[in-house]
Image (cartoon, helix red, strand yellow):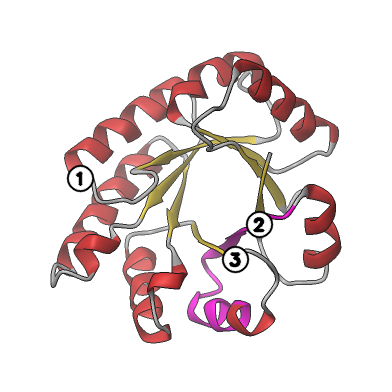
Amino acid sequence: MKNLELTLLSPNVSTMAIEQALTMVESHDLAALTVPPFWVKKLRRNMGNAHPALLATVVGYPFGFGRTETKQIETEWALKDGANEIQVVFNTSAWFSNSNGWPKIELAKLGKLIHAQEALFTVMVESSFFDEENFAKVVKVATDAGVDFIQSSMKSVDYQDFEKMKAAIPISVGFKIATNETYQEAVKSWGKVEIDRLCIPF
């Protein structure tokens, strides 16, 4: 399913898990595989440059409150190793510390760096920390930075929350939801929901 992504972001990711996940991506024709930065280079070798699935990795994971300079270096190495999508964790700490201007600067810098290498730029926003007003403001900041996707998380389908988040995202930006559901559960519960990408764990 081209609107499904597989993620491996647990601390105990192994070579075997990486290989099994890639097999699943290929057998189910999934859109992307997201892995820790450490594994990007190996997977790019395994996948080759013409693989139909995106190879994504995370920057600033899991909390997003590292220095911008550190995120820039992470991004540069991930792109060099062969990632073609970078998922940047939004700096919630800066946002709620009267530093709302800094996340805007950070995302603009990272977005420029990512798009210069013709990769996709995703901003990961933990929506449970934000009310509707602040979530909409974060989406605006990310959109102004040229984001391709906004990604948030939901444990299961909650259509009311889903519709509220979706309403804040312009049609020019893709919308992703990360869920804890299995492949079978995700296909069943999210099959009729209008969403650009659904991210499921391996």
Question: Which of the two discs, 3 and 1, labels the residue nearer the N terminus?
Answer: 1
Query: What is the CA distance from the residue labelled 2 to the residue labelled 1?
Result: 27 Å
Above or below 52: residue 100:
below
Question: Which of the two discs, 2 and 3, labels the residue nearer the N terminus?
Answer: 3
Tally of marks: 3
Q: Residue at x 71, y 33 (%)?
A: 52
Position of residue 185 measured from the top left corner of the image (x, y, whole percent): 81, 57
The residue where tag 1 is placed is: 68
Q: Check if mark 3's residue and mark 1's residue have beta carbons within 8 Å.
A: no
Q: Check if mark 2's residue and mark 3's residue have beta carbons within 8 Å.
A: no
User: From the image, which quarter does the C terminus lie in?
Assistant: top right
Q: Residue at x 66, y 57 (%)?
A: 197
Left-right relation of 121 to 158: left
As shown in the figure, which amino acid type bears the numbered disc 1?
Answer: Thr
Position of residue 8 measured from the top left corner of the image (x, y, whole percent): 59, 36
The residue where tag 2 is placed is: 197
* Secondary structure beneath label 2: strand
Position of residue 181 measured from the top left corner of the image (x, y, whole percent): 72, 55
> Is residue 168 at all visible to an observer of this figure?
yes
Checking the image for residue 47, the label placed there is: none
Query: What is the CA distance from the residue labelled 2 to the residue labelled 3?
Result: 13 Å
As shown in the figure, which amino acid type bears the numbered disc 2?
Answer: Arg
> Is residue 1 at all visible to an observer of this figure?
no
As shown in the figure, which amino acid type bears the numbered disc 3?
Answer: Met
Q: Which residues are magenta?
A: 162-181
Look at discs 2 and 3 and give the one toward the viewer.
3
Q: Residue at x 74, y 24 (%)?
A: 20
Left-right relation of 101 to 195: left
The residue where tag 3 is placed is: 154
Question: Which of the two discs, 2 and 1, labels the residue nearer the N terminus?
Answer: 1
